[in-house]
Image (tube, rainbow, N blue to C red):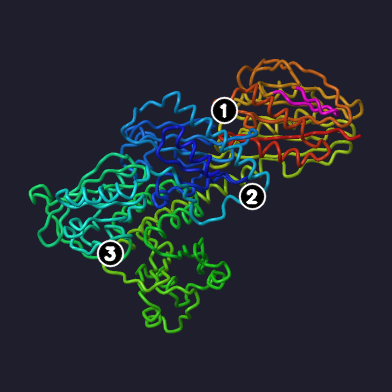
Amino acid sequence: MDTALAAVVRESGAYGGLLYVLPPGEDVLRLIMVAGVPSELTLPWRRVALTDPMPVAEAVRERRLVWIGDQEEMARRYPRPALVLPYDFALSAAPLTAGGTVHGGLVLLWPGTRSPELGPAEREGIESGCDRLGALLEGATGRGDPLLTADRPRAVPLTAGRTVPPGEAAAVTAFIDRLPGGSCGLDMHGRITFITPAGADLVGRDPQDLVGALPWEALPWMDVPQVEDRYRAALVSRRPQHFTVLRPPRTWLAFELYPDPSGMSVRITPADPAEGAPASPSVPAAGPSRATLLYHLMQLAATLTEAAGVQDVVEQAADQLLPALGAQGMVLMTAEDGRLKILGHRGYSAGLLERFDSVRLSTDIPAVRVQTTGVPGFFPTFADLRREYPSAAHEDGMAAWAVLPLIASGRPRGSLLLSYRRPHAFPPGERAVLTSIAGLVGQALDRARLYDAKHDLARRLQSALLPHTLPDIPGLKVAARYLPAARGLGIGGDFYDLIRLDEYTAGAAIGDVQGHNVDAAALMGQVRTAVHAHATAGSSPDQVLAGTNRLLNDLEPGLFTSCVYVHLDLATRRGCVATAGHPPPLLRHADGRTELVQVSPGLLLGIEPDSRYPVREVPLPPGCVLVLYTDGLVEAPGVDLDDATAALAGLVERADPTDLDAMADTLIRHAPSPADDIALLLISPGG
């Protein structure tokens, strides 16, 4: 896989690539490999939900290539990554598919100097590389090979530059030393690989103190946002960059950065003070560089505005805050029914936190006091913590803690614990930043809890409208599935039903009301009730649909409904099918042959009150399986509907007809990532 990723980067003309996997049954992409860029740059995007407004999520969700030609297009279409990487570069994102299944996604990066249009050769390189990677991921999944084994993505080396002979290397060194000013080299991670004596003299440090260090960490006066910002700009855009910075007390220095795939060459020269903006000397940073913190906080602010629920807030906060702040542990807490409730954590064992979950708010511990008073607590050492809380026990193995109030609408809504494995000073500036961060998290948590409440209400409403159980009908085996759309409240208008009519007959229905909201769900309940009522009254399939259609026209809901109704005669082993603009059922014969049950479709329900609905009779011998489904099972952007239906028929043919539950799970698992609801009903007459 290393070789395949390096090859697609090379063949497409890109300078870097990010390989994501989509674990089976999950809706989150995980970054497992990085080539051509430092893995630290990818921290904000190591987990990408399929619903996130990100290029790779859209590519996987819609199974198509996404191309972003320049910075302006990125800002317009994807403001979140554009906010964190406001540089000129091009990007492609493509799904990795094999065997009809999406196994992951590939992101490729190009310099900002290239054309904003994607050329045919580049597209061919992307597509062929994605085919190879998709096949490798499918093979790994089939063998059960673990792909998520590390806490950080694997760095894949790309081909280095030419090897310099020893004699030439000495000449190059002498040439550099003779140039005016100083020079240094940075690796792909920004660390100094060498510095000339003149360069070390200009920055005021010995060379041995600088090699292997990040400039903004080894030289406190370089710990200003513009320094790391220009480094990141050179790294991402692959264009030369320059900046001027003040070395205290009065020395201005100019830095010129020249990037290439192996690292960065830097020229250092004295600068005219008039060219540099006034600045005060920096103080040593107490934690991570301020530029790094700034980028992570912008990413955190952007992601929290889109957090869809409480657990999403927990994951986003942990993903962004721990690396940005250099912390190793995080616990997010709130109050519920007079007790402390732990919402989520990172860096702690569940067993340890169970002892604190549900403690009374009268307990004098930092998390409770912060929630009730709204005053943050900072403890650089355990001695500081013990001084304020004499009964505290040192149980978590950490050495420093910040406990912050989560404020929303002017009131504390919970508390955020950040912990460090080493003693950590909290100077006033950092305390202010941490308190502000907690405010962002508190506001996001308030919105997320409201979202979860709405989502729970929608889920209960959907559950109430769909059948709790299907009737047990002798001589009939059935299996059903319902999967809500990935977007929105998780509620929609798809429905299914199995109706016991008498000892020898039954009715089966499946339908799809337009929309994915409460209105669609409410109308779905009315449609299902109408179908049920007409069926139990002894109506034929065409009469069932005609009667339901008249009801919808009387209600004038402004929404249309597709539906298939099948009358099942278990004595004669025949079915009578009528459809109102719905995808035709599939019939799998006992020998495995699968065909569409073609019925002349009537109009969608709710359009014309006097619509007629033709019927067709089909034999249902023992061992056959009738597959009723909604269009969410087959429709996907850019995929021909006939091809998608044929692929579904192929899955039905290969499935075991004696195990309908396994067949249903297989069909759902191979469905497109649902932008639409999915309902599925499988019916098999017994022997």
**Residue 238 lies in quadrant:** top left
Asked whether the beta carbons under mark 1 and mark 3 sit within 8 Å of each other, the answer is: no
Foreground pick, 88 / 57: 88
Q: Amino acid at mark 1?
A: Pro
Q: Residue at x 69, y 25 (%)?
A: 646
Foreground pick, 644 / 579: 644
Q: Amino acid at mark 3?
A: Gln
Is 555 located above or below residue 293 in the figure?
above
Mark 3 or 2 closer to N-term? Answer: 2
Foreground pick, 228 / 251: 251
Foreground pick, 334 / 355: 355
Residue beneath label 1, please? 557
Residue beneath label 2, please? 145
- Residue 250 at x, y percent in the picture: 9, 59
Is 648 located above or below residue 218 in the figure?
above
- Residue 543 at x, y percent in the picture: 75, 21
- Say what secondary structure mark 3 lies in: helix
Apparent side of residue 450 relative to residue 640 in the rendered image (left or right):
left
- Residue 165 at x, y percent in the picture: 34, 47
Please tell me the numbered disc located at residue 506.
Answer: none
How packed mark 1 is, by other alpha carbons closer than 10 Å (few <14, some 14-19, many 20 or more), is few
Give the magenta-colored segment's residue range.
584-595
- Say what secondary structure mark 1 lies in: loop
Apparent side of residue 467 relative to residue 115 in the rendered image (left or right):
right
In 3D space, how far apart are the residues under numbered discs 3 and 2 (Cα atoms)?
Answer: 44 Å
Q: Amino acid at mark 2?
A: Asp
Residue beneath label 3, please? 208
How packed mark 3 is, by other alpha carbons closer than 10 Å (few <14, some 14-19, many 20 or more), is few
Mark 1 or 3, which is nearer the eye? 3
